[in-house]
Amino acid sequence: MSSEIPVKQIDPSSDPSDNNNKPGSVELYASRKKIYVKEVKGFFQRIRNVSLLLLMGMYFLFVWITQDGQPLILFDLPAREFHLFGITFYPKDFILLSGMLIISAFGLFFITTLFGRVWCGYTCPQTVWTFIFMWVEERIEGSRNKRMKLDQAPGSGSKLFKKSTKHTVWMLIALATGLTFVGYFYPIRELIADIFTLQANGWAYFWVAFFTAATYLNAGWMREQVCLYMCPYARFQSVMFDPDTRVVSYDPNRGEPRGGRKKGVDPAEAGLGDCIDCGQCVQVCPTGIDIRDGLQYECIGCALCIDACDEIMDKMDYPRGLIRYTTENELEGKPSKLLRPRTFGYGAALLLMIGAIAFTIATRVPGQMDALRDRGALYSFNGQGRIENSYTLKIANMTEVPQTFVLSVQGLEDIQILTQTSITVQSGENRSLPTVVDVPPEAISQSNNEIFFRAQSETDETLLLETESRFVGPTR
Ligand code: SF4
Ligand code: SF4
């Protein structure tokens, strides 16, 4: 018997609990069969509960936290400012934000190569919100069997009460999610006040309604359908797998031939493997598949089937791990390596990107200065016989506080600014300042000369802006 992890296409519409899913072609969209997920407790469910609480806590709290009067996280689109953990980014920093997204992508690839779809199973927002909605459902409608009976039962007051209570709680969670999401783009305190006093603009209502509806539908109704039909990651993640990727797998060497038996019966004497064919691993699966059919793209790596099977193994006094995190090589009895060329590749790219972005952020100057030459006249002579050039200086303050800059110019002997030599720029402001510079004729030996404008903050000596420009004079 081959012990490799076979990848099979399983028709998700077929009844997973009858264990008769067979390889075959898959329709682009199969009619849906409602999945009643059985609640299970266990080691991996506890890990998910912790990650779920942490992620939800961060999501709902970060939007309220301010630091030195600035929001901890705010994507202020009208002001074109992105506040992230005490640093304000501007459109010119777009490359940094792109770099952070690339780091996230490489991080995902790196983890997927090592441990399969742990992102999907423990941290993906679709999984997190679906598990919260399922938890609410279980509290209100009861266990899997009770929910199935309730759905089949004729309409009654009790059924109406349970269903309406469940949907009301789901809607409230969805509304809190929608408001919080929009709160990352529209200061949350103003948003809440404006929404409930009907003062918000139309877009705010639209986006809150949109994200509320999306959360309610995705986590309450569509659930596994989002993973099966809408998520692109589910489709291409298998290319990151190799025989050493640790994924949730059933061990057919140990489990087969499967079959029911009484507790205490020696499987070897009964000619059976350790799988008692109880179907618990299928009943707890949120995507409704049977892990015993091999690795399938529908598997989100949530490990609920491990918890369910370990519970059965404990009851049968068999060793745990009939379903476990393992690799194709381990199942074939071959040595399995954690670090391999693919992980080194993704890991090296990840470290390189993190290093480059960290260096760029650490050395980033929170301001910018540009000097635009006046195109009207190349140069002129003033009353003192000196040569004048005109510029427009543009100074941006990207710090969190107003800054007064002292302006200077260098590059030619006795060069000086004739106009205003100090300017105050508010936080996030970009100011233009017409500026005239002159030099004595003997200071230039050629018609086109390199000069530098500097803007030194009066209060922050590390904040020095500099830009290069040209000073034009007569040909000598
Ligand atoms: S839970 Fe374990 S014993 Fe039960 S059917 Fe699944 S693999 Fe077999
Ligand atoms: S097969 Fe197991 S790990 Fe995969 S989605 Fe189903 S319960 Fe989760």
Image (cartoon, helix red, strand yellow):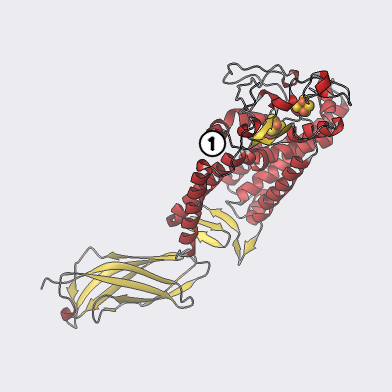
Name the spot of residue 180 as percent of width and height, x first: 65, 49
Tell me if I can see residue 104 in this picture. Answer: yes
Q: Residue 306: percent from the left, percent from the top?
A: 74, 34
Residue appearing at x 63%, y 21% in the figure: 10
The quarter of the image holding the C terminus is: bottom left
Q: Position of residue 149 (x, y in %)?
A: 84, 23
Residue 218 makes an appearance in the image: no
The answer to whether 353 appears left or right of 144 in the picture is left
- The vertical placement of 409 against 204, above or below, is below
Residue sitting nearer the eye, 126 or 75 = 126
Mark 1 highlights which residue?
Answer: 240
Q: Is residue 244 above or below residue 455?
A: above
Amino acid type indicated by mark 1:
Met
The residue carrying pointer 1 sits among few (fewer than 14), some (14 to 19) or many (20 or more) residues within 10 Å by Cα, namely some
Quarter location, residue 412: bottom left
Residue placed most toward the observer, 264 or 112: 264
Q: Quadrant of ligand 2?
A: top right
| Residue at 61 percent of width and 65 percent of height | 69
Foreground pick, 328 / 139: 328
Quadrant containing the N terminus is top right
Residue 17, quarter of picture:
top right
* Left or right: 446 in relation to 453: left
Q: Secondary structure at mark 1?
A: helix
